[in-house]
């Protein structure tokens, strides 16, 4: 069983900085589903906390696959000025969110070697120049 511990991830800046994502929530009330959330509280404004969530789902009678879902969200706060008529700065608000969502579909009859291969392929793809250019520079891969 995995331990609910802080997850340290580097950001993508020129000089990377490690960000600590702390566990925030755990299992819900759905049988066969386990969910945990994490957030990086270093920004100080809860609405702007980057988050990670993991969900695992066990096979059912109608769906014989394990499913592992991951969502990473990076909110960007709206730039506000304190030049209101009342002189009171408006409340911080989220301007937009960049997000990543993935789902691993792992048949219950799959071997550990096949699951290891899949994870290794995805890990390699995530650092492949074609994908990096598509994400960072919004370039088409063809």
Image: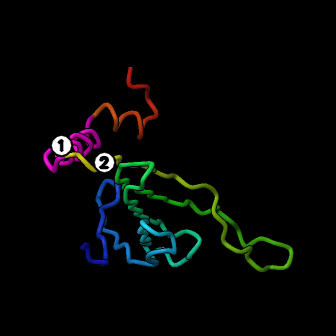
Q: x%, y% of residue 9?
A: 30, 64
Question: Could you give the CA–CA distance between mark 2 and mark 1, rounded to whole angstroms?
Answer: 9 Å
Question: Which disc number belongs to residue 1?
Answer: none
Give the residue at x 22% y 41%.
Answer: 124
Q: Secondary structure at mark 1?
A: helix
Part of the protein shown in magenta = 111-128
Q: Secondary structure at mark 2?
A: strand
- Quadrant where the image shows the C terminus: top left
Give the residue at x 27% y 42%.
Answer: 122
Q: Name the one closer to the observer, 77 or 51.
A: 51
| Quadrant in the picture for residue 32 | bottom left
| Quadrant in the picture for residue 75 | bottom right
- For the view shown, which residue lies furthest in the front direction? 61
Q: Name the one closer to the observer, 74 or 115.
A: 115
Q: Are marks 2 and 1 in contact (CB under 8 Å)?
A: no
Q: Residues within 10 Å of mark 1 (few under 14, many from 20)?
A: few
Is 115 in the magenta? yes
Q: Residues within 10 Å of mark 2 (few under 14, many from 20)?
A: some
Colouring rule applied to residues: rainbow
- Quadrant where the image shows the N terminus: bottom left
Give the residue at x 42% y 55%.
Answer: 60
- Give the residue pinned by disc 2: 106
Q: x%, y% of residue 58?
A: 37, 60
- Give the residue pinned by disc 1: 114
Q: Name the one closer to the observer, 40 or 118.
A: 118
**Which comes before the other along the chain, label 2 or label 1?**
2
Left or right, 88 with respect to 39, comes to right
Number of numbered labels in the structure image: 2
Specify the principal SS of the magenta part. Answer: helix
Q: x%, y% of residue 69?
A: 41, 55
Above or below, 7 against 134 in this view is: below
């Amino acid at each position: 069983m995995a331990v609910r511990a802080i997850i340290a991830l580097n950001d993508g800046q020129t000089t990377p900085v490690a960000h600590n994502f702390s566990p925030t929530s755990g299992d819900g009330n759905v049988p066969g589903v386990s969910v945990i959330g994490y957030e990086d509280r270093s920004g100080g404004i809860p609405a702007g906390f980057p988050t990670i969530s993991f969900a695992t789902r066990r096979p059912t009678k109608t769906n014989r696959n394990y499913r592992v879902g991951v969502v990473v969200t990076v909110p960007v706060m709206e730039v506000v000025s304190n030049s209101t008529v009342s002189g009171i700065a408006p409340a911080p608000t989220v301007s937009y969110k960049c997000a990543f969502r993935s789902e691993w579909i792992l048949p219950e009859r799959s071997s550990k070697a096949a699951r290891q291969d899949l994870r290794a392929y995805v890990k390699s793809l995530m650092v492949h120049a074609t994908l990096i250019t598509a994400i960072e520079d919004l370039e088409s891969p063809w």
